[in-house]
Amino acid sequence: ADDGYDLWLKYTRIADRAVAASYRRQLQGWTVLSTGATADAARRELRRALPGLLGETIPEAGAVNRQLVVGTSQLPLLAPLHGKVAGLAPEGFIITHTRIQGKESIAIVSATETGMLYGVFHFLRMMQTGQPLGEVSSSPKTKVRILNHWDNLDRTVERGYAGFSLWDWHQLPGYIDPRYTDYARANASIGINGTVLTNVNANALVLTPMYLEKVKALADVFRPYGIKVYLTARFSAPIELGKLPTADPLDKAVRAWWQDKIREIYTYIPDFGGFTVKANSEGQPGPQNYGRTHADGANMLAEALQPHNGIVMWRAFVYDHQVPEDRTRQAYNEFKPLDGKFLPNVMVQVKNGPLDFQPREPFHPLFGAMPSTALLPEFQLTQEYLGFASHLFYQAPLFKECLDADTYARGKGSPVSNVIDGTLDHHTLTGMAGVANIGNDRNWCGHPLAQANWYAFGRLAWNHQLSPASLADEWIRMTLHQDAAVVQTIRAMLLATRETTVRYMTPLGLHHIMGWNHHYGPAPWIKDKERADWTSVYYHRADEQGIGFDRSARGSNALGQYHPPVQALYNDLQQCPEPYLLWFHHVLWDHTLRSGRTLWDELCYSYQQGVDSVAWMQAQWKTVHRKVDDAVHAHVTSLLAIQYNEAAWWRDACLLYFQQFSKRPLPAGVTKPT
Ligand code: GCW
């Protein structure tokens, strides 16, 4: 049985004989010319993959006709190809048909060892997905392609639904779990080059020598795979560890403490990547405790990291329930005025939407509002508000919706993707961050199909132009089955999950009506006087007239934080795209929607459609029985049954609750709760 451990690196034998034979003809031998740890990693991968894919060992032998040659363009033999890689980003690579020492060859070449390894993984992916071994030239569109682990030092994972943390702090550095290498392989195979090991709700202890020894051990495993290690910095560490009376970022002793600490970290990890910081949000300490700004805080760390080439990823996810302000407006209020005030090695890390990883949100208004600042988008692969690891939710369409959204920052055609890849405002420090959905479950991500989110995130961070459909295709072929009909069925399921979930959880722009704190299941009735911003009634605002949060100029004017054409799009109730209707407007129950139905009826139908779509997914999945592995099939079948029951639970709970306000009957075709 397939336990999911091998992820998309299973290297199952290629089923199509003609394809396999053609690959075999082109691969009479292979050689990795470079030496060193990364070249060894490439060699190990080819040794593992080629016999798996082709069912026979391909000799490691150079200078044979029809060979695969791997190396960097500094090597004399590959120097003639240098011109072709010179224009690419350092981690870019080419795969090209050429003659080397007079032999017909396929060459995988990069200017760097890491790029060479990426080229090998790309080449293997071409084989895994049955593509012709044609010419490739690939260069990442962003620089910092990074996972954020919300992993605590006791191995619990905040919002983690796939077991405990991979990092076995207790046994590190003495025991190096082989899984660390498999983690690095998986990441390198999709171009991820950084990992923040610890929770943004940070524990300063990780900055002490005892833990730095352990972090170093992980960094040593990851380095050959081109992956840098980063940590979260607890802003009050100078007090907690340094016994200073303050953590004021403008205090000399505090600055000196961080400089020493950072110097110390680099003695353990010479290529340490830097820090992610959550400050002055949800009770975390930060510069504002001392009357300083986020820029003061970020720049203090950036200045200390700069001599070592480290960076700061300073999170814009800040809000304060004491402030009487629409929570979705707070990050912009705080950060927009700081544009231009951050040092060049600071990135401001912005969640995809202005609230908190909902099934659907409009893009965050900070995208397009801080042209002088490097912005790092943050997506959440772990499904905090998306049914945890129980519900199937393929997130690539959600990522894409944000990346493709037009900010109009420099007129029409200023999508978020061009803000974050640096092309719009000429930034060179660029990236994409994803909150990992990985734990120590045997299959890494809990739901057997949730690996697709890790996969799609990495691939999109490399190239945001890839489509959710093609990424689903790749992942399914490599992971579940090679047969085109099976791939098509599962791809259709995956692509439907996003809209399906939106429908049964938060249709028409509803948001944050999940259970209090755990965020699982429906609870539109939740109210809390202390923390309105963590409760449901604050967001849906249902009353006898209607439902929805008025964020137009008549309401909180969160819409005013967007560029005028975006405002124009959403401001008018008649024009507003319906997926965002109740995000931006309080709408009368009898308001007529594009379908001709009233808002109330449409809401009811949406919930019903969500439930029906899960039933459709179940039917689809049935058809691939005996095609995909039995254990995987059974596991997903059980989870889909959970998802179906819970979709019905969402429908029933939300409709019964909202019906108290609408006082209207359920329309025909909507199942009455029993
Ligand atoms: O989504 C919310 C979560 C918190 C999380 C916070 C954040 C790490 O409910 O658990 O804390 O966001 O992103 O900082």
Image: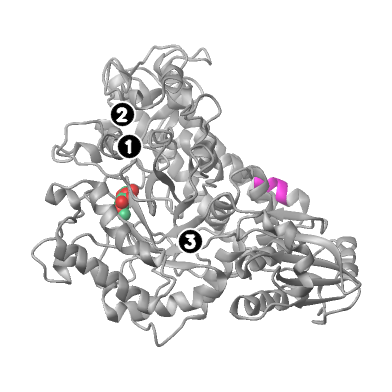
Q: Disc 2 residue type?
A: His
The residue lying at 20 percent from left, 63 percent from top is 255
Quadrant in which the N terminus is drawn: bottom right
Residue 38 falls in image quadrant? bottom right
468 over 595 or under it: above or below: below
Q: CA gap, disc 3 to disc 1?
A: 24 Å
Q: Which residue is mark 2?
A: 540
The residue lying at 31 percent from left, 77 percent from top is 211
Q: Disc 1 residue type?
A: Ile
Q: Is residue 229 visible?
A: yes
Q: How many marks?
A: 3
Q: Which residues are magenta?
A: 487-491
Q: Are marks 1 and 2 in contact (CB under 8 Å)?
A: yes
Q: Which residue is mark 3?
A: 446
- Label at residue 596: none
The x and y percentages for residue 239 are 14, 66
Quadrant in which the C terminus is drawn: top left
- First reached walking from the N terminus: tag 1 or tag 2: 1
Asked which colour scheme the image uses, the reply is one colour
